[in-house]
Amino acid sequence: MGQALFSLLRPAYESTPELAALASEVRAEIESSDMLKRQIEFDDRVAQELSALKLTDSHADAFENLLSEPGLNAHSERSRIGISKSGAALGRNSQNQPEAQSKEGELEEEELEEEEEAGERVKPARPRTILFAVGVGLVATLCMVIFLISDRLNSFEGADRISELLESANALTGDEFEAVETRAGDLQDWFFLKHGLEHYAVPKQFANVKTVGCRVFKFDGANVAQIMAVTDKEMLLYIFPSHDLGIRIRKGKWEIVEDDKWVGGATGINDSCFLVAFKGSKDEMKEFLSDIAR
C-alpha cells in the first residue's frame, strides 16, 4: 500500500526540492513500517510454532538469547518472554519426569540388591570348596586310621595291666622280699614248695640271672611271683598266669610298656607271662633285650 501511494505522488514531489526531501523521508518511514510489519508477522509465526514445542529450560534460554539480539522490536521481546515462560513451564514438567524416573530406578535397584542378597544366602558352594572339604575329611580319616593301626601294633591285650604292675613297683622298699641268692632258673622248686606256685617259668636267656630276693603277692586276685635280680643294673622279674590278668602275648615276642619311671618287657612262656622291669626308657629296654639274647 505504501509503495502504491508513493508512485502516485512521485510527479508532484520531484518538481520541488523541498517536497522531494519530504517524500524521501516519508518513503523511508513507509519502508521501515513495511519491514516492521513483516517482522511482526514472522515473529508471530515463530512464537506459535515454538509454543507448540516441548522445550526444556536450556532450549528456552537459547531462544531467549537469540531473540534478544539488536534490531528486534518490542513485539519480538514480548514473544520471547512468552516463549521463555512456556519453555520454563515445559522445563519444570520435564524436570518432574526425571525425578519420578529416578525414584523408580532407586526402587528397582533396591529390589535387585535384595534379590542378590537372597541369592548369596542360597548360593551353592563352589566345586573347589567342596573338593577341599572332602580332601580335609579324607586326610583326617586317614590320620585317624593310621593312629589306630599304629596304636594297635604298638599295644597288646592287657597292656594296661602291665602298666599297673610297673606303677606298683614305686612303693617297694626292699623289705617285702625274702633273701634268696641263686639263679632265676633254679627257683621253680622254691616257689612251689614255699608258696605252692605251679606256673613258674623263665625264658632261657634269663635263667642265669643272679637273684637277691623273692616274694609272692596278690594282684587283682592273681598270684604273682616277683624276683629282685641284679645284672649290670637292678631289675624286677614277674611271673604270673596270663589268663588271670587278661593278658595275651604271643610266645617268643617281646612287648615293651613304658611308665613314668619304669619300663617293662613282657613275653609269653607256656601259659604264663614273664615280665622284666627296670627304671629307664623304652630304648634302653630294647637294647637290654637285644644284649641278653646273645
Image (cartoon, rainbow, N blue to C red):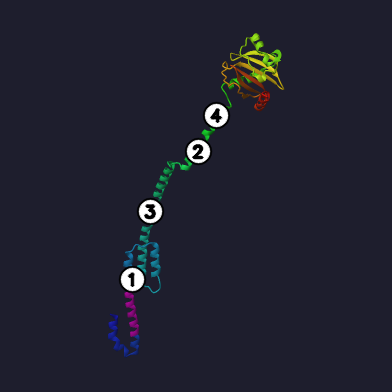
Whether residue 67 is in magenta: the answer is no
Residue at image mark 1: 43
Residue type, mark 1 in image: Asp
Tag 2 or tag 3, which sits nearer the N-term? 3
Say if mark 3 contacts mark 1, CB within 8 Å. Answer: no
Indicate whether 30 appears above or below 240. below
State the image coordinates of residue 203 (x, y, percent, origin top left): 64, 19
Question: Which of the two residues, 235 or 191, is positioned nearer the viewer here?
Answer: 191
Verify CB contact (< 8 Å) between mark 2 and mark 4: no
Q: What stretch is highlighted in magenta?
A: 23-43
Q: Residue at x 34, y 84 (%)?
A: 24
Q: In this view, does 226 lie to the left or right of 69?
A: right
Mark-to-mark CA distance, 3 and 1 = 36 Å
**Vertical comparison of 128 with 225: above or below:** below
Say which amino acid is labelled 2.
Answer: Gly
Q: Is mark 1 on a helix, strand or loop?
A: helix
Residue indicated by mark 4: 149
Counting other residues with Cα less than 10 Å from the Cα at mark 3, is it few (<14), some (14-19), or many (20 or more)? few
Which of discs 3 and 1 lies nearer the camera? The answer is: 3
Q: What residue type is labelled 4?
A: Ile
Q: Which mark's residue is nearer the viewer, 4 or 1?
A: 4
